[in-house]
Amino acid sequence: MREAPDFDQAAAEETAPQAPSEYMPQRCFRCGSDENEVPILPVRYRGESTWVCTRCLPPLIHG
Ligand SMILES: [Zn+2]
């Protein structure tokens, strides 16, 4: 039994501040999934800075 837990992983994830006023989920340019669904990575594509999700990354890598 814990007296005063100073770190609760689940609660921390739920309440982690994400710059609430400015936070806008980024979308994968390829499939449109946003970062609330899948991890999104920054990528350069055709001269633009955009985002790609981890599901779309392997096909990109393998061409
Ligand atoms: Zn994607």
Image (cartoon, helix red, strand yellow):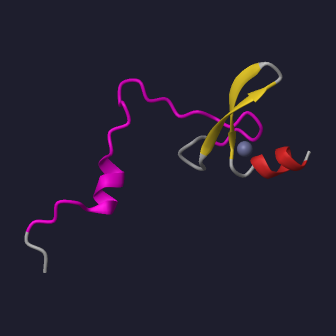
**Quick one: quadrant of the C terminus?**
top right
In the rendered view, does 6 fall on the left or right side of 41? Answer: left
In the rendered view, does 50 fall on the left or right side of 22? Answer: right
Q: Is residue 44 above or below residue 52?
A: above
Ligand 1: which quarter?
top right
Task: Name the residue at the right extreme.
Answer: 63
| Residue 26 image point, x, y percent | 58, 33
Overall secondary structure of the magenta section: loop
| Residue 52 image point, x, y percent | 70, 39
Task: Residue at 29%, 57% (x, y): give it.
Answer: 11
Q: Which residues are magenta?
A: 4-33
Q: Nearer the viewer, residue 19 or 36?
A: 19
**The stretch drawn in magenta includes residue 25:** yes
Q: Is residue 52 above or below residue 23?
A: below
Q: Is residue 35 above or below residue 13?
A: above
- For the image, the number of numbered tags is 0
